[in-house]
Structure formats: structure tokens, C-alpha cells
Amino acid sequence: MKVFGEKTIWFVTGSQHLYGKKVLQQVAENSRAIAAGLTKSRLISAEIQAKGVVTTPEEILKVCRKASSDANCVGVILWMHTFSPAKMWIAGLQALDKPWMHLHTQFGAELPWSGIDMHYMNLNQSAHGDREFGHIGTRLRIDRKVVVGHWQSEKVQSLTDDWIRAAMGWDEARHLRVARFGDNMRQVAVTEGDKVSAQIQFGYEVHAYGLGDLAAVCAEVNDADIKAQLRRYRKDYVIADTLLQDPQQKEMLTNEARLELGMERFLEAKGCKAFTNCFENLTGLSGLPGLATQRLMSKGYGYGGEGDWKTSAMNRIVKVMSRGRPGGTSFMEDYTYHFASTDQVLGAHMLEVCPSIAAERPRVEVHRHTIGIKKDIARLIFSGATGPALNISTIDLGNRFRIIVNEVDTVAPPEDMPNLPVAKALWQPRPNLEIAGAAWIHAGGAHHSVYTQGVTTEQISDFAEIAGVELVVIGADTTIAGFKKELRHNAVYYHLNRGL
């Protein structure tokens, strides 16, 4: 089974009755072969199901309505094997509420030079059939991904999977619930936002729950479950014998086990796959969850610190998009700078960095936490794995949302940091800190982000397009002048787009 399980992508082929029954039979056979071939590819992460050939407006509308109502259908790939008059597609595309991708390909890769005849030409007309179809997508002002090339090429398959993963992220967003334990950190601007607008734009729901309700569930966790959880900790992480032999430190570890089990039970009961908390709102809890939050993130839950529900939701969405791929995803914060021959950023947070990004087996330590609550808290400590990564920030501009991406390169710290009791990652922003930092600030990016090595810029771009959200990318070719011009142009476009 593919990594996305029962979630599928439909493959629908357009044609018409002009060419006769035999041609349509061959079109259907070729379409099934393409869907099966793509599904078989190691580069494709979901099953692609052939849903037949449509040749009339009625057939097109019917299959689009079926796709829209099928809970397991996450998106649709459309391809015109022959010429398919595009007015036939208007009602269907208007009724389709799942994202769709236009695959501009043909069944055979090379022309049979000596044997080519008009039968071959009539059968393999995607070169202009897809252009006719592309016109109606543009005329209807539908944003969609267009992938061009032979369906058996790795590049086409890779680009197709980029879109599939974005569609999976969109499907998750449309069904996601975020739990807020406590409110936003007081006086902070960027963690605020319009939850109704977010639900309209992305689909996810944000619900507040009382800390007392969560504390009651945590209190019900029994000793047997806690002991089993401690055994898991010893198996998964490096834990010094001195910690387990010290009664006070072991009690702090036990406290994290209770919090983790309690929070997970609460989230599952409420149908939530993402959550927030805040060190300023902990009444009834035994402390700010450290190891517990890190563990939940490693299981796939989204998280945002200090009530940051937008980052929590995006964290979960990216974790879904990256399923089955190497590289982790974590809540993150640009914490402090290293100005030197190459400027660098040390990313971290008070406690909550996901071990999925770790370069080595994390170790559990107990240290004093002094922000919001003064208490010893167990947490995982590690450095992030090296390699390319993204920092992603979703912000509410008041009249719309913007997704900001900075491409970065994570590096190994030049020295150990024995006195820093938190997980961290050290990276070099592209093109450099001078430009990346200024561009991030001009764009209004948050101090929190989703840090990931599991998805690509292309995939986030596909997701933003499906969501209808502005995306700006800070990368190797970014200049401040060009970036500011892009922001100004985007402001005009998104303002006019809402009124046209």
C-alpha cells in the first residue's frame, strides 16, 4: 500500500465520440496503463485510480461530482488523450471542489517515424487537445498545476508527486482541528489572527479548551501506563542512570509521561491533530509540557507555542505532506544570531523542538525552566540534522493570509554547546542572513516557523496555489529590491482578485 493509505488520486481522460469506438477503446486502455504505471512508480506516494474516458458534458459533470463526494478522493489528474472540446468541461470543472492537476503528456514517448499515419495522429492528439483544455481552465480563472512531459520520466513523476503531496496537505487542512490550551501569549501580535477567516481559507477549525478539562484527563492516567511510557523513553532515547536514580529528576520524567498520555487522549477524544499551549496559561497543569510536547510532535501532531495556532496547523499539514519521506518537521523559532564570515541563525525554543529533525539519538535531561513557570522540566536535547531545509511562516495580514518560505542550509555547530539545555538547529539562510532577514521582516514573517527537511519549496508552492493563498519565497536569487516589488505587486493582485 502507498504511504497515504486509502487516500487516492483519480485519473480522468478526456476525448470525444468523433473518432469511433476502437479509438475510444484504445484511449481507455492507454489511460489505465498510465494510471497503473504511475501508481507503481517509487516516486508516487498515492494510488492513482483510472476513472475512465469522458466524452460528453454529462459524463464529465458526473465524474466531477463523484470525485467531489468521494471522501477518499483527494484530487484529480486530468489528461486529454485526443481532442476534447473544452466547452464540454465547463460545468464539470465548476462543480469539482477537489484540487486538480493538468497532465500534458502522451501515451508513447517517441514518434514511429516510418509507420506514422493519420490513425496514429488522431489517436495521439494531446499536443493540441491539452491546449484546448488548458484554455478553458484559464478562462474559468482556475489555479492549477500543469505538468508537461512523458508520464514515464522521473521528472514528470516527481512533479506529479509534489502536487499529490500538496493535495494531501490540503485534504488534511480541510479536516483538521486545532486545540488551544490557554490563550495567546499576552501582547504578542503575530500569534493572533482571525480564526473564522482561517477556516474559510484553509478549512481547519480552531477550538479552545479549558485547562481544567485537560488537567482532569491527565490526572486519570494510571501508574501502569506511566511505567510503560517510561520504558518507551528508555528505549527511544539516551537517559543517564543518574537521572533515573535521582527521585526528583525521575519524578519530572514521570510528570512528562503523564502529560503526554493525558494530552494525547484528550486530543484523540476531540478529534484534534494539532494543539497549542502557553507558558502564561498553565493553571491546573503540573508544568509546561516539554518532552511530552516533543513526543507528540514526533507522532505527527502539529504544535505551536504561546498559542500560535496558525503555526500549529501548518506544522501538522507539512507533517502530512512529508509522510514517508526522509527529513523531519518541527515547530521552530529564530532564536539568536552568529555574525561571522558566514552569518548563521541558531534556531531553538524553550522546550518544544521535534526530535524528528535530530541528527543523533536525543538524550533526556532535566533542567530548570524559568519563563512563565519556574520548575524543573524533562526535555529532549539534540542538534538538527544537516542539509537543506525550509522555514515556513503563515501570517494573517488582516485582509488575507500569506505564506512565507525561506530556504536555508542546516550545518553542524562548530563547537559543542554543553550549557544550552534545549534542542536546536544551526542554519545559514539563503541567499544570506542580511538579505533573508530583511526580506522576512518586510514580508511580516513571524518569529515562529515550521522548520522542515521533509518537503520542498515546489510542494509548498503547490499547496499555496490550491489554497488560493499568497506565497513568497526567499531563496538563493532573492534581492531586497526585487522582493519588495513582488510584495507590492502581490498586494495589488490580491486586492483586485477579491473584487473581480
Image (cartoon, rainbow, N blue to C red):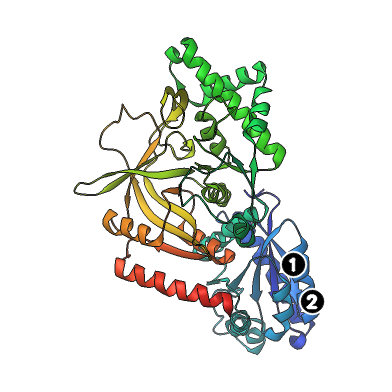
Say which of marks 2 and 1 sits in front.
2
- Kind of residue at disc 1: Lys
Q: Is residue 64 above or below residue 134?
A: above
Q: Nearer the viewer, residue 191 or 293?
A: 191
Q: Secondary structure at mark 2?
A: helix
- Kind of residue at disc 2: Glu
Q: Quadrant of residue 487?
A: bottom left
The quadrant of the picture occupied by the C terminus is bottom right
Q: What residue is pinned by disc 2?
A: 59
Q: CA distance from mark 2 to mark 1?
A: 11 Å
Which residue is located at x 66 percent, y 38 percent?
267
Q: Position of residue 31 (x, y in %)?
A: 69, 70
Q: Position of residue 276 (x, y in %)?
A: 56, 41
Residue 452 appears anywhere in the view: no
Q: What residue is pinned by disc 1?
A: 51
Which residue, as the protein is rendered here, is positioned at the far left? 341
Q: Quadrant of residue 73?
A: bottom right
Q: Is residue 171 above or below residue 477?
A: above
Which residue is located at x 51 percent, y 38 percent?
278
Q: Residues within 10 Å of mark 2 (few under 14, many from 20)?
A: some
Q: Is residue 342 above or below residue 13?
A: above
**Going by the image, does 21 lie left or right of 474?**
right
Q: Position of residue 61 (x, y in %)?
A: 77, 75
